[in-house]
Amino acid sequence: MRAINSDDEYLLSMYDACSAAQTTNVNWDHARRTADKLVERGIIPPELRQEACEALVESDDPARLFRGHATQKMLHAAFDYLGTPPAEAKRTLLAILPSTEYNAFACRGPFGAPIVVYNKVLILIQGFFIRSLLAFAYPDSDVSTKRFSSADHAETILLLAAIAAGSPLVRGKDIRTTALMSGDVPVEAATLSQALESFIVLHELGHIVKGHIDDCGFRAVTLGDTTIEAYSLSRDQEFEADLFAADAIFRKTTKKASLSLTAGLLFRFFDLIERITRSTPTTHPAALARWERIKSRFALEDEEWARALDESFDFFASAIVYEDA
């Protein structure tokens, strides 16, 4: 085991502990062609071509993704919502690691730096989930394909929730609509995915800024072949971190819809996971209770997107079939 002399090295030890964290062969030619296409379509300006290329390569290489362009972009996007980030937020180290044991968590490193760890698996699932949701909501748009119906996309969303829940009976290859993941990512899907990431990072920053990580218990989190002690927060602290993130997003956007399309999407998807497993998390409040708390705080009950979101996810939930039913 390597000697740990800083919080950066502490994060590196987490990376080493993840059995899936191995460098892969990356395709620079494909990344360059994709970046060129993004420039040609006007999605990114020419000066960002190289950065986009590096980000695409990074997405296929755990060693680069661990603390590369994506983590810095995620932090900066969250800081943008905060305006002037508190000092503790600016000191935060963010890492992306593969694990099935968490979505994201905050802790303090052994040398005092605040740390946020984000699950790579969640990033992959949320991207596919958002594209599928857009295809379900707008079946005649460019997001969808003519081969798939709204029912196909609804089924995909349930399968993704089952995968996120760790169901051993469901695998990625069981999803018929995987063709949606090929080709260009629609601008709308990319924008929603980034906003969802920002809400999650802001939630974890809320734990840091509010001092929760210095006043809490601990729980075991599995990272590859090892287990570390992560922070176990109270339900009140989880609600407080939710509102910290929601407040930051609403102050920046001044639009109630922005809360439906971040907190609403996240918690209704988590609610599907809880319904599939027929259990509520031991470390957090029930997802639906978290969404209801935000709706009440910001008077979202009659907001158009919140209503549409709840109707859609109620429909998805009604389609869940239990094996012992």
Image (cartoon, rainbow, N blue to C red):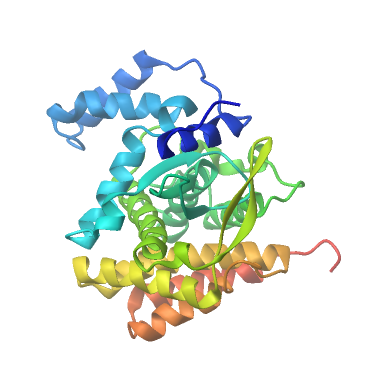
Query: Does 120 sit above or below residue 61?
Result: below
Residue 155 point in image, percent of width and height: 61, 55
Query: Does 31 sit above or below residue 5?
Result: above
Residue 184 point in image, percent of width and height: 36, 35
User: What residue appears at the point 42 percent right and 75 percent down from the top-left corner?
Assistant: 240
Looking at the rendered image, the quarter that the C terminus falls into is bottom right
Quarter of the rendering containing residue 59: top left
Q: Residue at the right extreme? A: 324
User: Can residue 61 be seen by looking at this rendering?
Assistant: no
Query: Does 215 sit above or below residue 151?
Result: below
Looking at the rendered image, the quarter that the N terminus falls into is top right
- Camera-side residue: 319 or 22? 22
- Camera-side residue: 46 or 149? 46
User: Can residue 241 be seen by looking at this rendering?
Assistant: yes
Residue 169 point in image, percent of width and height: 77, 47
- Camera-side residue: 268 or 17? 17
User: What residue appears at the point 71 percent right and 69 percent down from the top-left corner?
Assistant: 279
Specify whether 35 is left or right of 145.
left
Residue 194 point in image, percent of width and height: 34, 50
Count of marks placed on residues: 0
Specify whether 177 is left or right of 134.
right
